[in-house]
Image (spheres, coloured by chain):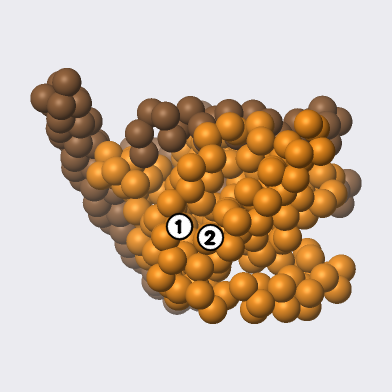
Amino acid sequence: MTEKEAIYYELLVLRCRQGQKSAFEELVRMWEQRLFYYIRRLVDDEQEAWQILQEIWVKVLRGIGKLREPRKLPTWLYITARNTAISHIRHENARQSFFENSKNISNNAGRDFTLSFDDAEQVHYGLGRISLPHRDVLTLFFLQDLSAEEIAEVLEVPVGTVKSRLYYARRALKAVLEKEVSNYE
Amino acid sequence: MNESDRTFRNKLLNMEKTDVTYRQRYEKEVRAMFEKKLSYLGRAGFAALALVGLLAALPFAELTFSKVGSGMEYVVRIVTIPGLVLALTWAVVTGWIAARGKFNLRTMPPRIAGIGIVLGFFGIVLYLFVFIVPVTLNDPTDVRSTWSGVLGIQLSLIAFVFLVIVGLCVVLRILYRTQFQTREKLLEIEYRIAELAEKVESKSSK
């Protein structure tokens, strides 16, 4: 995040706290597509994803006054989005498997996590075909709003774990795309 | 984030195809988030409040437009004119909410509370000036004047409390507003500086 963006977020939060409807509308307009994309990667059903997004805005509207660091608005939004989505998943008894899967891939810190995927269509396709924990971390990475440290904050894991998850997620994505290419050929 | 990153992200976001019906429903719900839809009972409640406002406006209006007497016209009118305006504002605001059937959750409660407190203050002051003070002044030996005097003191105290609350609210609101405006201006300046710095940086890198 650049300094300009950080200042802009603080300004936006300040105006939202003042109850300025236009500021909140701006916040929604600015973030809804990104948050929806992220939620959609976590939740299969589109209708449910819209419902979650709506719940997120209710939480944001209530909680923005208590946000301690306005410059960390993106992190807070993704945390709110993830928690809301997880509580929906939990509601459908899927949370258990979600975390079991994440344990299996979380213990390889320190790997290189530089990604070189540049075809958005392929990435979008591949994201839909990898496991949920891989999708979770990789979507946050591809949306490019957060640093590795901030992703770690959203996922509630150490930075090293984020890097290792990204490494394995990238491998999984590559495998899916390569398989798809070989099938096509 | 550089331009190519942004382009990639936008491309990725545009890959997501959504159902128009779901989207429209979501947009409707988000719009409704700011406003609470009132039930018939809620609307009736607000209509009753509007009626109370109109009823409260009657004595204020009567005293504003009639000759008060005993040389207190100006003092009384200091109270009755703002009282009338506030009572009518109250009636208009609550009547408008009842007619619309929607209630803005963020802006309306503090406004209604503010008007209510100030209106209450003027009501008490009006009662004091018009009904209590004249009786006490006209015939100090009358037993009613003693009761009126006691009631007058009590009402004066209540009015004083109202006044203090209103004053405190106004002062806090002004302080908060000033603090907000100062911070907003500072951030706007900081934002412009950051914007300029970015431009200079991109020019020098070229």
Q: Is residue B96 in view? A: no
Q: Which chain is brown?
A: B
Residue at image point 84% right, 45% down: A47
- According to the picture, the residue beneath numbered tag 2 turns out to be A166
Label 1: few (<14), some or many (≥20) within 10 Å? some
- According to the picture, the residue beneath numbered tag 1 turns out to be A113
Of helix, strand and loop, which one carries label 1? loop
Q: Is residue B14 above or below residue A90?
A: above
**Residue B199 in the figure: left or right of residue B6:** left
- Callouts 1 and 2 on one subunit: yes
Q: Color used for chain A? A: orange
- Which subunit holds the residue at mark 1? A
Label 2: few (<14), some or many (≥20) within 10 Å? many
Residue at image point 17% right, 21% down: B206
Q: Is residue B11 above or below residue A67?
A: above
In percent of width and height, residue A181 lies at: 73, 36
Decide which of A147, A72 is in the foreground and name it: A147
Decide which of B115, B121 is in the foreground and name it: B115
Q: CA distance from mark 1 to mark 2?
A: 6 Å
